[in-house]
Amino acid sequence: MAGVFDNPVFPYFAFYATVVVLKTMAMSFCTVFHRLTKKVFVNPEDTAGRGVKPSTHESVERVRRCHLNDLENVIPFVLIGLLYTATGPSLGSALLHFRIFTGARILHTIAYLLPLPQPSRGLGFIVGILVTMSMAWSILSNSKY
């Protein structure tokens, strides 16, 4: 694993992985913002003293679903991307994977939150999954098992 950090691909992976992880973390703040502005809380202790009952709201649920989708896609990207980096891919191929995934996740988020008409959100999701699967395929096909 020490060779991963010496690999010229690693700083690029670290940059793009950090971008998508920070985007995922930002979704938590976006959820809080929507909960506070819509006065929507799901736990009874959160509603105490606010004069509201636990409830849901479509805009809060939309942000939550987008955040959940990020968690389902960004974590595998980071894990598989690290393993992919360890296989010593060409810089051009690695950058293509990392940039496309990052762009796809940003598109997915924009399409989810605005909302944009389908298939924009679906394309963002599928492209991101295909990038992660492409890296996984590269790892498996280059493995010496």
Image: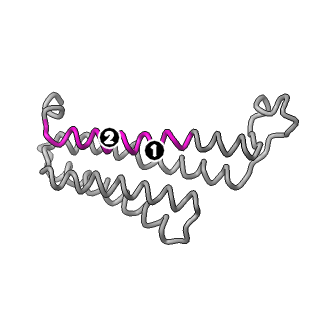
Name the amino acid type tagged 2: Leu
Q: How is the image coloured?
A: one colour
Quadrant assignment, res 137: bottom left
Q: Secondary structure at mark 1?
A: helix
**From the viewer's perspective, is the residue at label 1 or at label 2 nearer?**
1
Name the amino acid type tagged 1: Lys
Q: Is 93 in the magenta?
A: no
The first of marks 1 and 2 along the sequence is 1
The residue positioned 67% from the left and 49% from the top of the image is 60
- The main secondary structure of the magenta stretch is helix
The residue positioned 50% from the left and 55% from the top of the image is 109
How many numbered callouts? 2
In this picture, residue 93 sits left or right of residue 131: left
| Nearer to me, 30 or 75 | 30
Picture coordinates of residue 7, whole percent (x, y): 13, 37
Picture coordinates of residue 96, whole percent (x, y): 23, 57
Give the magenta-colored segment's residue range: 7-28
Picture coordinates of residue 132, whole percent (x, y): 32, 53
The residue positioned 77% from the left and 42% from the top of the image is 39
| Nearer to me, 84 or 95 | 95
Disc 1 from disc 2: Cα separation: 17 Å
> Which circle marks residue 79 in the picture?
2
> Which residue lies under the disc numbered 1?
23
> Which circle marks residue 124 in the picture?
none
Binning the other alpha carbons within 10 Å of mark 1 as few (below 14), some (14 to 19) or many (20 upward) gives: some
